[in-house]
Image (spheres, rainbow, N blue to C red):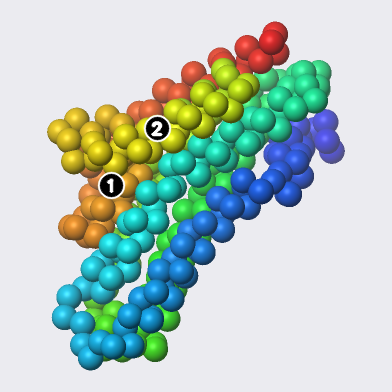
Amino acid sequence: MKNSYPFISMFKAEHFKTKRNIAVLSFLLFPFIATMSICAYIAIKASALIVFETNPWTDLLGNSLLIMYLFYPFLVTILVYSLCDMEYKNGNFKRLFTLPYPMHTLFASKILFLFEIIFISTLIAYASFLLSGSILNHFFPALSFHDYDIRLSCFIAHTRLFISLLAVSFIQYWLSLIFKNFVIPIGFGGFMTLFSLFTMNKEHSYLNPFVSVIHSMDEFVTYQSISFSNHNYLCLAYIIVFLFINFFTFKLQKNR
């Protein structure tokens, strides 16, 4: 069975290797913890409100979460480096290439696992957002969460978030494959996260996928937009380009 389905075997191996990885667990739990923390904060403040006259999904919950989501790109950076670092330790890359599996199977299993982790984290972020609004609406009906239907715009916002995070992860994966030392990949991710905060409103900011992570929620809070922007199209292009770049860089690990 293992030889008949090499991809499934390798994909299961990725899950087994990372089941106790703190970076993976933190990345998955971050959106839930962040959202519930904001929910608790709003609940404390809401006890003094009689009525809330604007959209609470965006003006209360969305604006508060926007601050928390600024950390998402840096968490992706740590996640990606952690996955590569596991392979660097004890020469796991060399052992990996001794397996009787095609190169594209080995690479695809790792990329799909990264895709899965980011997808689950984004899904948790989406579900936590809706759940927190429902909780606040139940205990504080004066906030008027029930008066607004944001399900579609919220879904699109988190779809944009997923695409942006995936683009950032592919760029960071390339850097983590090239540099074994954590300083450059994580330093670059940290710098770009901070740089994005100061340039997110500039004319050509859409060229920076790190900015797109912030804009995914900002466009929801500001416009409740349900359409894709230049940020999202560029991120899709980054995903495709760096998918190929990462594959050829991954092949080079065999000779390092």
Marks 1 and 2, the one that precedes in the sequence: 2
Quadrant holding the N terminus: top right
Categorize mark 2 by other alpha carbons within 10 Å: few (<14), some (14-19), many (20+). Answer: few
**Residue 92, above or below 19:** above
Mark sitting on residue 215: 1
Image marks 1 and 2: residues in contact by CB distance under 8 Å: no
Label 2 element class: helix
Query: Disc 2 residue type?
Result: Phe
Q: Give the camera-side residue of 16 and 53.
A: 53
Q: Amino acid at mark 1?
A: His
Image quadrant occupied by the C terminus: top right
Residue 82, percent from left and from top: 63, 36
Q: Quadrant of residue 108?
A: top right
Identify the residue at image location x=63%, y=52%.
Answer: 25
* Residue 210 in sight: no
Name the side, left or right, on which 26 lies relative to 236.
Answer: right
- Nearest the viewer among 43 and 56 is 43
Reading the image, the residue beneath label 2 is: 191
Question: Which residue ends up furthest to the top in the rendered image?
Answer: 255
Q: Is residue 71 above or below residue 83?
A: below
> Which quadrant would residue 125 be assigned to in this image?
bottom left
Task: Give residue 118's position: percent from left, percent from top.
Answer: 52, 46
- Res 54 label: none
> Is residue 193 something that shows in the picture?
yes
What secondary structure is found at the residue carrying circle 1? helix
Q: Position of residue 110 (x, y in %)?
A: 63, 33
Foreground mark, 1 or 2, reads 2
In the rendered view, tell whether residue 113 sits above or below residue 89: below
**Observer-nearest of 46 and 99:** 46
The residue under the point 39% across, 74% down is: 41
